Amino acid sequence: MTRKLTKQQRKFANEFIKTNNAYQSAINAGYSKAYAKNAGKKLLENGGIKSYINKKVGKVEEHESNEADEVLRNIYRIGAGRKIERRYVNIDNLKKEALDNDESLHARLEYMEDTTIIGPASVKEQVSAAELWFRLHGDFKNDSEEIEKQKVRKLKAEAEIAEARAKSVDTSFNDEDRTIILDDMEDDN
């Protein structure tokens, strides 16, 4: 059973979450500088503080995960051609101009109109969403297997050439001269 945190311990934990610096977090929480020097060990090993930090971090991770899940669901819906809700604001520029481009709330209500459309996305958006979905799953590649092999082969060859050039520079040169020579070799390509 963990006991309840003191205000100072809770402040330390919150500061540590923000900064990931035990020493500075302890000072910001009101601990003395002498105590803060060992704060990492003493405070971070406290079961109550550990639990508090893990709970806080867990809540954020869960919230972020839920938002990421919603984004993925929307990508899937768009790619599958399902109906989605879209909101637009239409601005009647003639009315806006007639009201001398007034930006007050009353004037904006006169020349702005909120529109909601429910239906599938455009074909272009569907294709883009489907491509993104397949890329996320690793099921979509632009290049054939043979082209991928050739790209890897080319990268290996370029690395070998660079290594050979580096070895060809005489070791009697100092580091500055060696750098200049290597830069010149790169410029030649």
Image (cartoon, rainbow, N blue to C red):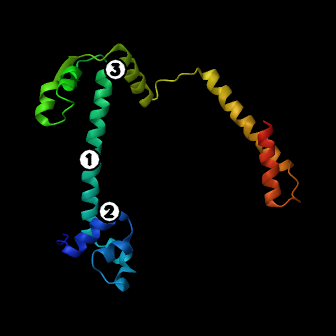
Q: Residue at x 23, y 75 (%)?
A: 8
Q: Residue at x 26, y 47 (%)?
A: 62
| Quarter of the image where the C terminus is located | top right
Indicate the position of residue 61 as horizontal and vertical percent values.
Answer: 29, 49
Question: On the rendered structure, is 86 left or right of 145?
Answer: left
Indicate the position of residue 44 as horizontal and vertical percent values.
Answer: 33, 71
Task: Identify the mark nearer the N-term, 1 or 2.
Answer: 2
Q: Quadrant of residue 45?
A: bottom left
Find numbered disc 2 in the image and state the secondary structure of the residue it sits on. helix
Find numbered disc 3 in the image and state the secondary structure of the residue it sits on. helix
- Determine which residue is flagged by label 3: 79
Q: Looking at numbered disc 3 in the image, what kind of residue is underneath it?
A: Gly
Q: Looking at numbered disc 2 in the image, what kind of residue is underneath it?
A: Ile
Q: Looking at numbered disc 1 in the image, what kind of residue is underneath it?
A: Glu
Q: Nearer the viewer, residue 61 or 108?
A: 108
Residue 85 in sight in this render: no
- Determine which residue is flagged by label 1: 62
Q: Residue furthest bottom?
A: 34
| Quarter of the image where the N terminus is located | bottom left
Q: Alpha-carbon distance for marks 3 and 1?
A: 26 Å
Q: Nearer the viewer, mark 3 or mark 1?
A: 3
Q: Nearer the viewer, mark 1 or mark 2?
A: 2
- Determine which residue is flagged by label 2: 17
Q: Residues within 10 Å of mark 1 (few under 14, many from 20)?
A: few
Q: Alpha-carbon distance for marks 1 and 2?
A: 16 Å
Indicate the position of residue 161 as horizontal and vertical percent values.
Answer: 79, 39
